[in-house]
Image (cartoon, rainbow, N blue to C red):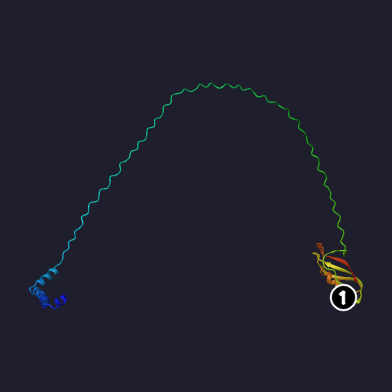
Amino acid sequence: MDYARRQRDPTRHMLGIAFVVLLHALVVYALVTGLARKAVEVIKKPITATIIEEIKAPPPPPPPPPPKRIIQQPKLEVPVMPYVPPPDIPPPPQVIETPAITAVTPEPPKQEYVIAPPPPPVVVEPAPPAPPRPAVRRGIARIAGDDPVYPREAIRAGVPKGRVVVRLQIDEKGNVTDVNIVSSDPPRVFDKAVRSALEGWKFRADGEKYTGEVEINFQLRD
């Protein structure tokens, strides 16, 4: 109720309006009389600033140097040794040199050496020459190789046995280089089988070429 009554009071409302009008009148009066211009001129005046340097205290004096320490060396007192007289040394005994007696041995008589004449040279008779090797070596033994195979043709033909004499040409390393049929019984039945087998035989190496002879016997077993 009181708040509504205050809002409706015209006296308070008029006082507020009069205060605002008075405030505007004072501002207009100040502008007319030049108070405002003076205030602006005062503001436009240059401002002088003075820099006051800080008074620095003088630096402290350097500390005095430390006093020099004088080191006095101790005095060395050399002890005085009492005088000791030298001992009496008797003179060395005199050595009487006696002449040395050396035994004189007579020199042995000189022996005369007779140089004997050198023995006569030994005559070595040359060894007799080795007997000449046979032109054909018989009875030579193989060291490698297979036996001949019994021919099937001979089995079918009913040939019970056979004999072939062969001469072989053998090189320095013991290899067979040639097979030569000397004789065969029955003729030409076992020649091919013998030739095929003996071409792969190997004999002892003799360091030289030679001719060997072997005999091949065939026997048909039941």
Q: Is residue 92 above or below residue 220?
A: above
Quarter holding the C terminus? bottom right
Q: Residues within 10 Å of mark 1 (few under 14, many from 20)?
A: few
Q: Which residue is mark 1?
A: 152
Q: Residue at x 87, y 68 (%)?
A: 167
Q: How many marks?
A: 1
Q: Residue at x 14, y 69 (%)?
A: 43
Q: Residue at x 14, y 77 (%)?
A: 5
Q: Is residue 189 left or right of residue 54?
A: right
Q: Is residue 108 above or below residue 198?
A: above
x and y, in percent, of residue 8 in the image: 13, 78
Q: Is residue 114 left or right of residue 57?
A: right
Q: Secondary structure at mark 1?
A: helix
x and y, in percent, of residue 85 in the image: 47, 22
Q: Is residue 176 left or right of residue 220?
A: left
Picture quadrant where residue 101 is located: top right
Quarter holding the N terminus? bottom left
Q: Is residue 116 above or below residue 5?
A: above
Depth check: give the residue in front, 202 or 179. 202
Indicate the amino acid at tag 1: Arg
> Outermost residue, front direction?
1
Q: Is residue 82 left or right of residue 70?
A: right
x and y, in percent, of residue 105 in the image: 72, 27
> Outermost residue, left direction?
33
x and y, in percent, of residue 17 in the image: 11, 77
